[in-house]
Image: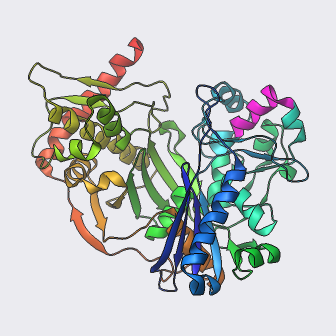
Amino acid sequence: MYLGLDIGTSGIKAMLVDEAFATVGVAHAALTVSRPHPGWSEQDPAEWISAAESVIADLRRDHPQAMAALKAIGLSGHMHGATLLDASDKVLRPCILWNDGRSGPQCATLTGAADFHGIAGNLVMAGFTAPKLLWVSENEPDIFAQTAKVLLPKDYLRLWLTGEHVAEMSDAAGTLWLDVARRDWSDDLLAATGLTRDHMPRLVEGSDVSGHLRADLAARLGVPAVPVAGGGGDNAATACGMGVMRPGTGFLSLGTSGVLFAATDRYQPNTGDAVHTFCHAIPDTWHQMGVILSATDSLTWLSEITGRTVPDLAAMVDQVTEPSPVSFLPYLSGERTPLNDPDATAAFYGLRRNTGLPDLVQAAMEGVAMAFADCVRALRAAGTRLEAAYAVGGGARSRAWLQLMASATGLVLLEPEDGDFGAAFGAARLAAACAENDISDRVFSQPKIHAEIHPDANLGAALAEKYDRNHNAYTRLRPLV
C-alpha cells in the first residue's frame, strides 16, 4: 500500500493505493486562506499538520488493514510558498502563498541583482519564493533576521513526518534559488536575497527516500515507520500520476487556471514568452509549462454575474461548427504565458443587440482555447513540440470545449478513462518508486484512453483568424487600462 498526501490551497487530499495503483481509499480535510491586505494570501502551517492528521486518521479508521500494510508515503503540494522557521523549527509567520502578489516591486530588484533568467530558467514573478523573502527582509526585518530555514509547504509537512529538512527538485525549481540545469542550489541567486545554502533544505530527487516516518508519530498514527519519498510540486506530481515522464508527452489542465505541461530531457528555458522551466520529479528529466490564469475561472466569473450555474452555461454550447460572433480576452486576473502581464484585463468585443448568453459562453471558451494556443507556440519556441496531450480538469468534462481547444491549439486531446490522476495519485506513485527503487513505466504508466478529440480543420482555420484579431485587440486595448 502507498499513501499520497497533497496540500492544495483549499484542502489536503490523501489517497491510498494498492500495488496495482488501484484506489483503496480517499480522504479530504479543508484548509483556510487568510487575506489580511489586498493582494496578500497566507496560510497557517499548523493547519497543514492538523489536516494531515485528520485525513490519515480517516483512512486508518476506514481501511485499518490496508494502512497497517503501508509501504511508503509520497508528498505533493502547491508550489512557491514561503514557510519561515527559526533555529528551533518554530514557524515565524504565516506562509506566504503562491498567489500572493505583494512582492511585485521586489521582482525588478532581483531581476537586476543576478542571472535569474539564465540560472533559474524563469522570469522573476511575485508568485515565486525568492521575491517573497526579499519583501520580508525589507518589511519584516526582525522576522528575516530570525529565519534559519525556508521550506516549501509540502516540505514543512515532511519535517513533521520525518524530522528532516528536505526538498526535492521539482518544487525547489519554483523557488528561483535552484540552478535548474545542475539541479543544485545556486549561491549567486541565494545571495541576491540575502540567504545562503544554510537556509536551504537538503535536496533529493522526487523518487528518492527523503527520510522515514518518525517512530513516535508512526505509533500515534497507527502505521509502520515507512520511508517518505521526495515527492513533487503539484503539477509535476500530476504528471507522475498520468505517466507524463518523457519528451513528447504532456497534459492540458483545464482547471480554475490552465496549464500546458510538457516533459523534456534537457534544460530548455524560454523566459521571453514567460514559459516556466522546472526540474521534473524523477532524475535527469525536466519539464516546461505554459500557464494561463483564468481558464474555467472565466466561466465561473460569467456565472457569478449572470446568476446561472457553470454547468448550465457550459450546456449552452453543445456542438461547435463555427466560432462565436463575439470575441473574448480571458485576462480576468492578468496573464502569465506569453504576456507576463499581471495588469492585463479581460474584454468582450463584437457585441451587438442580438448577442445572447450562449454567444458569450462560447466566446469565453474560445478565448481560453486561444490562450492555450499561445502556450503551444511558446513551448514550440523553446524547442518542445507536442502533438497530443491528456485533457484533465473540470473543464475537460465539456466535449464542445475540448473540440474548440483541439482546433485552436492543433493538439490531439486524449480523454483518459474514468479515474483520479491528480497530484495525490502522483505522490502515491512516487512513494512506490522510492520504496521499490523503480522509476520504470511499470510505476509511471499512462492511463487508458477513453476518447481522442482531433482538431477540426475548418473550425481551426476560423479560430486562427480570431486568434490574430485577439492579439491585435489586446495590443490596442492595453494602453487604455
Residue 65 figure quarter: bottom right
* Magenta stretch, overall SS: helix
Which residue appears farthest toward the top when viewing the image? 480
Residue 84 lies, in percent from the top left, at 79, 45
Instruction: Please tell me which residue is depicted at 63% across the width and 49% down the height of the picture.
Output: 174
Relative horizontal placement of residue 307, taking residue 286 as reference (left or right): left
Single out the residue that lies furthest toward the front: 61
Q: Can residue 106 be seen in this view?
A: yes
Classify 95 as above or below 465: below
Specify the quadrant of the image occupied by residue 363.
Answer: top left
Residue shown at 31%/39% (left/top)?
A: 299
Q: Looking at the picture, how far across and down is residue 119, in whole percent?
A: 67, 46
Q: Is residue 352 left or right of residue 154?
A: left
Viewport quadrant of the C terminus: top left
Count of labels shown?
Answer: 0
Task: Pick whichever, 413 or 469, lies toward us.
Answer: 413
**Quadrant location of the N terminus?**
bottom right
Task: Give residue 398's position: percent from left, percent from top.
Answer: 24, 53
Position in image of residue 33 (x %, y %): 60, 41
Could you say which quadrant of the image residue 138 lies in?
top right
Q: Is residue 365 magenta?
A: no
- In the image shown, does 293 or 58 lie closer to the viewer? 58
**Highlighted magenta segment, given as a residue range:** 130-141
- Please, is residue 410 above or below residue 334 in the view? below
**422 left or right of 389 in image:** right
- In this picture the colour scheme is rainbow
Residue 140 among magenta residues: yes
Q: Which residue is drawn at 59% across and 61% down?
A: 76
Residue 295 visible in the picture: no
